[in-house]
Amino acid sequence: MIQKYEFNDTTQLSPHFNAKEFRCKCGNEHEFSVFDELVQKLEQLYAALNCSKIIVTSGFRCPAHDKAVKGSGTGQHTLGNAADICCYGQDGQPISSKVVCCKAQDIGFRGIANITAAYQYTHVDVRPNGKWYGDEVHGNSTVTDDFYKYFGGEDMKGIDVSVHNGNIDWGKVKADGIDFAILRAGYGRLASQKDEKFEQNYAGAKAVGLPIGAYWYSYAMTPEEAEQEADVFLSVIKGKQFEMPVYFDLEEKKQFDLGKKQVSDIMRAFLKKVESAGYFVGLYGSASSLTTHTADDIKSWYTIWLAHWVDQTNYSGAYGIWQHSEKGKVAGINGNVDLDICYKDFPTTIKSKGLNGWGNAPVPVQVADAPKTESTVTATIKIGNDTYKGTFVKE
Ligand SMILES: [Zn+2]
Ligand SMILES: [Zn+2]
C-alpha cells in the first residue's frame, strides 16, 4: 500500500527507517509517498547484510526534482516505490553495491541497479510489474537476469597447486579460462617447510593478474601446535596480498583419530589466530570430515572450501569454494591438477574490508555470512544408480 506523509512527518516506519528519510530533497516542503513494501524489503536487506546502518540518499521525488537529478520525471522515485541507498557493514565501511545488488535480488526487489562507478550506492524499488536489473555505469538498460552471474561471484573456475605441480606457465593457465588459484604456502610448524614453489607461484600468478589465495597443510595434534603453525603461516604470507581467502587444511588420519572435539579445538586455534591478524580465513575439508569432525560454530563462522570429488555434491552445509576434482587438465601445468569452483565474490569483499594485506583491518572481523543469509541451490544428484533432487545451502 502507498502511504502519504506530510513533509514534517517523523513517523518511525520500521525499526531502522523513519518517514523523514524518504521525503523529497527539492527544497519545497511538500507531502510525499512511500510504498510500505519498500520499507519492509529495506528492513529485510538490513538484516540480510548485517548492516550497521542504511542511508537513504534519495527516496520520494516530485516530478520536478526527478528531472533535476536526470530522471524521466515519471520514474519509480516519483511513485514512492524507490530508494537510493548506501549500506554500511559492522566495520562502518560501505558494503559493495555488487553485494547489495545480489542480496536485493534474493529479497525480491523488482528494480535494482548499481549507481556509481565506485560501487557504493544502489537503487532499489518495488515497481508494480516488470523487472530492471541495471548497472548505471553501463547505461540504463537491464544488464542481467542474475547479479550473482553478472558480478562474477558465481562459477569462477579455479585450481589449487603446490610444489607437486612442478613449474607452472601461469600465462597459459589464465588463457585456458582459469579465474583464480589457491597456492600451498607450506606445512607444519617450521618456516623451512614453506612450499618450495610458493614464491614462484605467487609471483607468476600475480604477474598475469589472477586472484589468488593460500593454504597451510596441518600436522598439529594440539591447539598449541596449531597456533605455532598459524605463526609460521603468517610469517610466510607476510607482506603479500591475497584476493581470495587463506585456508587451514587439516586432513591427516592421525588428527581425525583424536576425535571431533580435539580436531575442532585445533581448527579454532589456527583460524582464530589468522583471523585476528586481519585475514579472511577459511577451512578446507572433505565432505565427510566437515560432517563428522568439524563443530557447527566453525562451519557457520568461517568460509568453507569443500573437497568432494563427485559430479554433484550432496554435502548439505554451506561452502564458498568446491574442489570437485583432483584430476583436472589445465594448459601450462604438467599432469593432473585440482579443480575448484568459487560461488562468492571474495575479491570484492576482501578488498573492501581491507583484509589479506589490502589495508589495516579492524580485528576481529566476521569473515563468513551466517547460514541464514545464504541462498540455496536445487540440484539433481546421482549416487550409484539412484537419482534424487534436493535443495542445498550455498554460500
Ligand atoms: Zn520535491
Ligand atoms: Zn534511484
Image (cartoon, helix red, strand yellow):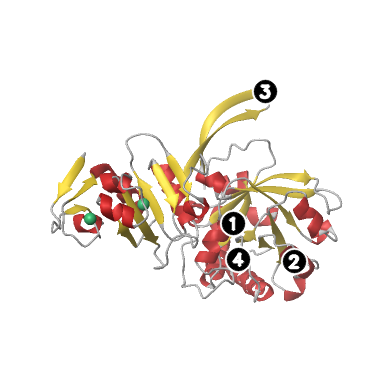
387 relative to 269, above or below: above
Q: Are marks 4 and 1 in contact (CB under 8 Å)?
A: no
User: How far, Cα to Cα, is label 4 from label 1?
Assistant: 17 Å
Residue 369 in sight? no
Q: In 3D space, how far apart are the residues under numbered discs 4 and 2 (Cα atoms)?
A: 38 Å
The mark tally for this picture is 4
**Is label 4 or label 1 in front?**
1
Vertical placement of 352 versus 284: above or below?
below
User: What type is the residue that disc 1 sits on?
Assistant: Leu
Q: Would residue 3 appear left or right of 209 to someone viewing this image? A: left
Q: CA distance from mark 2 to mark 1?
A: 27 Å
Q: Nearer the viewer, mark 2 or mark 3?
A: 2
Tell me where residue 44 appears, x and y as whole percent.
Answer: 33, 48
Among the two numbered marks 4 and 2 on one chain, the one whose residue lies closer to the N terminus: 2
Of 85 and 232, the residue lying toward us: 85
The label shown at residue 207 is: 2
Residue where numbered disc 4 is placed: 222
Q: Which residue is found at the position 72% from the left and 74% from the top?
A: 190
Q: Is mark 2 within 8 Å of ligand 2?
A: no
Residue type at mark 3: give it: Asn
- The residue pinned by badge 3 equals 385
In the rendered image, which residue does mark 1 sit on? 283
